[in-house]
Image: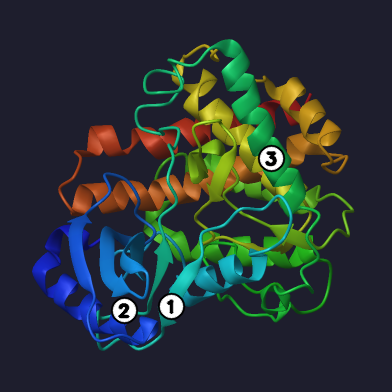
């Protein structure tokens, strides 16, 4: 649960000042402009600006504090430190822009949970609520600009999938549930995909009473996924939340940063491509919207991903259904969070999981034909 609305921002600022000063090896750092983002539930997020006197004069840096949640959780075992280590491990890999991580702290003394501080990259992010297909800065782009934006995004995804986990990300393959939902460690016997599915089964059980939106559909979808899993031995870096809404775009529509690595793991690239396709549908057609001109449809997305260096993936339909099930579980937990925190009434909160359940039912019906 995002608990930022209840945190004392003055006390947070006071705690950050000596922490950052020690990191920089100086006596004093100013902290100002603390701001809470409107969205985001998997971590507590606070944006701010740090300023200090450097050898060449006054320096300023926009930063982001992300604190592991301690209340209602969307995921089985959130791990803020693992998220930061993913970004550190990806830093320097060609075509995979990630924010620089300034510091991490597993100690719960300062903020009540582990946390990290990273740089805040400039740029714009396509919106989820409301969908960027409905309103926002992407609507104001030309069709050609939207195509260029999505090309840059898909190229970044393809670049990520060329990263060898052994190059700085070996901890993702050490076993155990060290990350978000089905993310984190992926060690142990069997293929990476089988281990991913094992974690999904455990997460599905953990969601328990939250699975009150279309449980019969979810049970049938899980049975189909487990009984028809692809023979896919790939074990590369998987983002776990691959979408344009987790990217910051610069003024020239290049990708400035790839964000939110809670669900990072090791597995086949189909996990990410399926999630990408599902989420575009979730933000567009599943809401009764028409895709903006210049935004590639499903077939064009698959083709362009491959043209930009992505893997050729069989059984894309299976991976899309997998993504729908994961999204439904996240949406079910989110609905509980929104209702229990008073942020939304039940009739509004239930729209999120019910949309993904409808998508899963449609894909499941198609697989039976």
Answer whether labels 3 and 1 touch (C-beta < 8 Å).
no
Camera-nearest label, 3 or 1: 1
In x, y percent, where is residue 171? 67, 79
Q: Could you tell me which secondary element the residue under label 1 belongs to?
A: strand
**Quadrant housing residue 59:** bottom left
Task: Work out whether mark 3 precedes mark 2 in sequence or the reverse, and give the earlier one.
Answer: 2
Camera-nearest label, 1 or 2: 2
Q: Residues within 10 Å of mark 2 (few under 14, many from 20)?
A: many
The residue at which mark 1 appears reads as 103
What is the quadrant of the N terminus in the image?
bottom left
The answer, for residue 326, to whether it is visible in the render is yes
Q: Could you tell me which secondary element the residue under label 3 belongs to?
A: helix
User: For the residues marked 3 and 1, what is the alpha-carbon distance in whole angstroms?
Assistant: 33 Å
Q: Residue at x 28, y 48 (%)?
A: 37
**Quadrant housing residue 129:** top left
In x, y percent, where is residue 317? 75, 34
Q: Residue at x 37, y 23 (%)?
A: 136
Tally of marks: 3
Nearer to us in this view, 12 or 300: 12
The residue at which mark 3 appears reads as 274
Q: Residues within 10 Å of mark 1 (few under 14, many from 20)?
A: some
The answer, for residue 293, to whether it is visible in the render is no
**Quadrant housing residue 295:** top right
Task: Work out whether mark 3 precedes mark 1 in sequence or the reverse, and give the earlier one.
Answer: 1
Say above or below: 1 vs 286. Answer: below
Answer whether labels 3 and 2 touch (C-beta < 8 Å).
no
Q: Which mark is residue 20?
A: 2
């Amino acid at each position: 649960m995002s608990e930022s609305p209840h945190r004392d921002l003055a006390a947070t600022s006071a705690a950050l000042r000596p922490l950052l000063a020690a990191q920089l090896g100086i006596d004093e750092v100013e902290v100002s402009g603390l701001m809470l983002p409107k969205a985001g539930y998997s971590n507590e997020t606070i944006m701010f600006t740090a300023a200090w006197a450097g050898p060449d004069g006054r320096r300023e840096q926009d930063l982001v504090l992300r604190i592991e949640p301690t209340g209602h959780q969307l995921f089985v075992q959130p791990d803020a430190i693992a998220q930061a280590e993913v970004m550190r491990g990806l830093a320097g890999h060609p075509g995979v822009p990630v924010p620089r991580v300034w510091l991490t702290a597993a100690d719960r003394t300062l903020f009540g949970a582990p946390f990290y501080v990273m740089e805040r990259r400039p740029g714009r992010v396509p919106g989820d609520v409301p969908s960027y297909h409905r309103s926002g800065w992407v609507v104001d782009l030309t069709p050609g600009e939207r195509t260029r934006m999505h090309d840059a995004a898909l190229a970044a995804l393809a670049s990520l999938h060329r990263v060898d986990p052994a190059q700085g990300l070996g901890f993702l393959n050490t076993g155990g549930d060290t990350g978000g939902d089905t993310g984190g460690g992926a060690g142990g016997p069997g293929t990476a995909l089988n281990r991913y599915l094992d974690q999904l089964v455990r997460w599905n059980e953990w969601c328990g009473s939250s699975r009150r939106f279309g449980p019969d559909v979810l049970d049938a979808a899980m049975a189909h996924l487990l009984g028809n899993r692809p023979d896919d031995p790939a074990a590369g870096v998987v983002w776990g939340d691959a979408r344009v809404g987790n990217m910051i775009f610069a003024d020239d529509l290049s990708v400035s940063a790839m964000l939110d690595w809670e669900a990072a793991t090791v597995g086949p690239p189909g996990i990410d491509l399926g999630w990408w396709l599902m989420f575009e549908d979730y933000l567009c057609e599943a809401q009764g919207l028409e895709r903006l001109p210049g935004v590639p449809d499903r077939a064009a997305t698959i083709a362009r991903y491959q043209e930009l260096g992505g893997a050729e993936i069989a059984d894309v339909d299976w991976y899309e259904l997998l993504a729908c099930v994961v999204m439904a579980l996240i949406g079910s937990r989110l609905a509980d969070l929104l209702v229990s925190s008073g942020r939304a009434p039940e009739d509004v909160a239930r729209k999120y999981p019910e949309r993904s359940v409808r998508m899963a039912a449609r894909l499941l019906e198609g697989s039976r034909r």
